[in-house]
Image (cartoon, grey):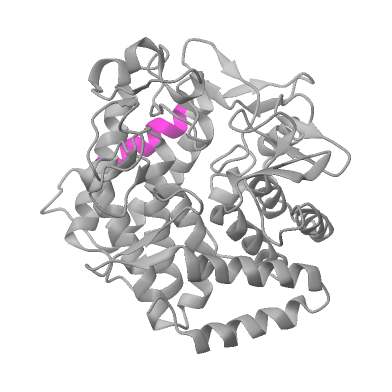
Amino acid sequence: MIYTKETTQIWLDRIFEKIEDNPAWRKVFETCFTDTLDKTIKILDDGTSFVLTGDIPAMWLRDSTAQIKPYLFLAKEDEQLRQTIKGLIARQFAFVLHDPYANAFNEADNFKGHHASDHTELTGWIWERKYEIDSLCYPVQLAYLYWKVTGDDSHFTADFFKAIDVIVKTWQTEQHHEDNSTYTFQRDTDRKEDTLSRKGRGPICAYTGMTWSGFRPSDDACIYSYLIPSNMFAVVVLDYIQTILDEYPQDDEYPQLKQTALQLRHDIHQGIQTYGLTKNKDGETIFAFEVDGLGNQLIMDDPNVPSLLAAPYLGYCTIDDPIYQATRRTILSEENPYYYTGKYAEGLGSSHTFYRYIWPIALAIQGLTTHDKAEKKRLLDLMVACDGGTGVMHESFHVDDPTKYSREWFSWANMMFCELVLDYYDLRVEV
């Protein structure tokens, strides 16, 4: 059993009472909230949980965390759901130990995925091996937030701390990608965003203190290899690791882990502050999206999370931070080449999807990073109005015709809608 139906229904009824003045929200919320529980989660024979991303038969470390995060409120009341979430944490960290460079995994050792086209170190468990910093951030975030929300620490096992050590060492290695990393990735494809240049090494970069990423959370290749939003997320997650190690010291097994994580956090944060700031067209200081340490920077944002727009949502800065506010104004404007305005909507698109298609995930983040309740309501109304008549969210939709959308079933987007609804009613997990 994944969850206790009676407990879940009682909790949902309390939420529905709050949403009674917004019946359109309620309908979409109920569909999205129960869809992920009923259709994406599978309990495996070893008791761990496997979470499908939706219409792709694989589990992303990133997506699976985002899909489950809104259930943390309910987990306080439902023992069975707590077991399910702990099972996901165990499965995520087992995958990290299997290969910290992979972003998506199979339910079994079945060699499904991109094995015919990809040139990298693959096993049957790996669906895709695009290295993305956030793939290592998200499992730590879920483990930390689960502990803080429920008080349950039974998921802090020997394998958990072993995986934490692997994560820290991987990020440390990728601070010096040119000299120390053995990771390469090439795909037989005409789509340049799906492969890395220089025989799979990626574009040239210099040391900055930040940690290198081959790909963005969109699974598209980085243009410059220091992805600022993902490094922001790493700083936050390294703070989580410090808090966990303060409470559960591992000095005997990993005597250098705490100090190494602390130094790594310092280096990455300093790298962001030194190399990750630039000026917008109005001369305001803002965060760049990507840099290479050689003077090249991108002014843009992507709708996936982590993003620059999501910096306060991730816990890197406050909503009122002046640099964040200047960055927000920039990326929610035409200065961002992926900001689209149309007949029905405006928001962030991506090189990963079609021209003038924007992402409900980014609309949700826009709502989750403002204090303005009227703005949150406007965005929720917009998301419902632009569901293409399907009653659920999608990966992206056309700003001039919401009936044109990508991905029929995308659980991450569904759950981001649910998270914004809960946030509107002041139900939020504090990061």
Q: Quadrant of residue 415?
A: bottom right
Q: Can residue 151 be seen in this view?
A: no
Of all residues shown, which one is farthest toward the left? 252
- Magenta stretch, main secondary structure class: helix
Note whether 412 is above or below 345 in the view shown: below
Q: Is residue 312 visible?
A: yes
Which x, y percent locates residue 285? 68, 25
Note whether 89 is above or below 359 in the view shown: below
Note whether 389 is above or below 399 in the view shown: below
Q: Quadrant of residue 281?
A: top right
- Taking 50 as reference, is 347 left or right? right
Which x, y percent locates residue 321? 67, 42
| Range shown magenta | 260-271
The residue positioned 81% from the left and 72% from the top of the image is 22
Which x, y percent locates residue 422? 66, 68
The residue positioned 32% from the left and 38% from the top of the image is 102
- Taking 234 as reference, is 162 left or right? left
Magenta stretch: residue 278 in it? no
Magenta stretch: residue 267 in it? yes
Q: Looking at the picture, tell me which residue is in the foreground, 401 or 180.
A: 401
The residue positioned 65% from the left and 72% from the top of the image is 30
Note whether 230 is above or below 152 in the view shown: above
Quarter of the figure that contains the N terminus: bottom left
Q: Looking at the picture, tell me which residue is in the foreground, 85 or 27.
A: 27
- Taking 386 as reference, is 248 left or right? left
Which x, y percent locates residue 414? 61, 58
Of all residues shown, which one is farthest toward the right? 343
Q: Looking at the picture, tell me which residue is in the foreground, 77 or 252.
A: 77
The residue positioned 25% from the left and 41% from the top of the image is 99
Number of on-image labels: 0
